[in-house]
Image: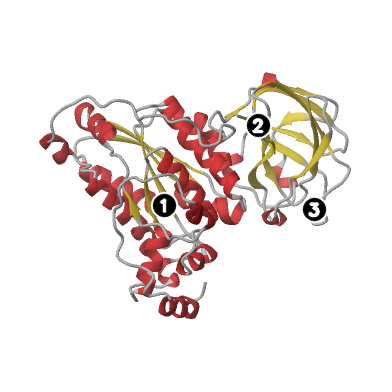
Amino acid sequence: MNLSLSVRIACSFATVFIAAVTCPADDPPSNAERAGSLPPTAVHVRGDLHRSREVFTTTGQGRVAFLGGSITEMNGYRPMVMDSLVARFPGTEFNFINAGMSSTCSHTGAFRLPSDVLSHKPDLLFVEFAVNDDQDAAHSYEDALRGMEGVIRSARSSLPQVDIVITYFVNPSMLEKVQNGEVPTSIAAHDAVAKHYNVSTCNVAVELAKQIAEGKTTWAIYGGVHPKPAGNRIAANLIEDVFRQTRFSLAEAKSANRQTFAPHPLPPPIDPTSFWRGRFLPRDAIAMGSGWSYVEPKWKDIEGSFRERFAGRPLTVATVPEAELQVTFTGTAIGLFVLAGPDAGVVEFSIDDGDWHAADLFHRFSKGLHYPRTVVLKSGLEDGPHQMKLRVSKKKNGASQGNAVRILEFVAS
């Protein structure tokens, strides 16, 4: 969105936004909210952060994880929040886990959560996926909900004491929706999860729209999809407001009565087939046939840019049509976490000897990049053991240069 558009919309909708307020926990989203007609508040405190505060205070140790896409991976709001925690809990030795991964959505987040986050046993978890669920994955409400519920329910199932804060960042189209009094689909879905699990949220989209309407900033000053320091400061300030309202500091802990805090309640899932049992499958679950290999690709010989974080690791690779393998898994969903580059192909799959279906791995960002993405091949299966046959299709996307399939991980839930 350019500056003139920001100013024009700000003038039109200046009366829509009021100062951010804190609301008590409320019921699941109404039909109007789900349809996107009610703007959420910028800061919505639900529950407290007392469990992690108690750990930081009594042990002098703190494990804090940040899960999200490139907005989390980059040095933006995350270091600002880290600095705030260090200041609020002087003397506490923190272990900060940067589990941000550029380009990835909440589906990838749910599937990699056990290995990248839960293995560290964090006391406090920050999550952001609103932008990537919108612009990268283009998830429906149901798919965005399955991903975010996968993250939150998995975290609370494995670590019942973990405190969580979700932050919704913003892109131009999402901002325009908020300025029109609508709720972007990904935010509506994520907020439904936050309400259900009593998790505090920080809505950068609403706060930025309000500040633009008040003439305090512009989209250009905010900095774009990957915010500049001014934009990241908006996000950090909203999280700071959550800290303030939950009395989240060493000083506040010392003035409070000492007590043992019960685990966070775990209500029934919103969607029983959400990805809360998301995981990477072990290698022995895959039986490779002819044409497949488990090898590190020779990236320097393959067209397309490549992110160094994926260097030095083997992938399950096939480039020849009709190469086939089999996967055994238990659960309700199966998918592929892939690097989809300029030559990304189409896969065909059959579950439990059923009909064959096709999934195109090529993404619009694949043209110049080996783009990391999770492709959920099938969800909503009957919970139980399954077998999937997977083969490289002879067909390919019209924009693709080949039939390559490069799989980082097989995922299931």
Q: Amino acid at mark 3?
A: Ser
What kind of element bears circle 1?
loop
Sequence-wise, which precedes: disc 1 or disc 3? Answer: 1
Quadrant of residue 364 within the rendered picture: bottom right
Would you name the residue on which mark 2 appears?
Answer: 333
Q: Residues within 10 Å of mark 3 (few under 14, many from 20)?
A: many
Q: Residue 75 — which label?
A: 1
Q: Amino acid at mark 2?
A: Ala
What kind of element bears circle 3?
loop
Give percent across and percent down for residue 247.
20, 43
Q: Give the side of residue 238 with respect to residue 6, left or right.
A: left
Give percent across and percent down for residue 89.
21, 39
Q: Give the side of residue 136 with respect to residue 17, left or right.
A: right
Would you name the residue on which mark 3 appears?
Answer: 400
**374 over 260 or under it: above or below:** below
Give percent across and percent down for residue 10.
42, 76
Q: CA distance from mark 1 to mark 2?
A: 34 Å
Give percent across and percent down for residue 136.
60, 53
Q: Closer to us: mark 1 or mark 2?
A: 2
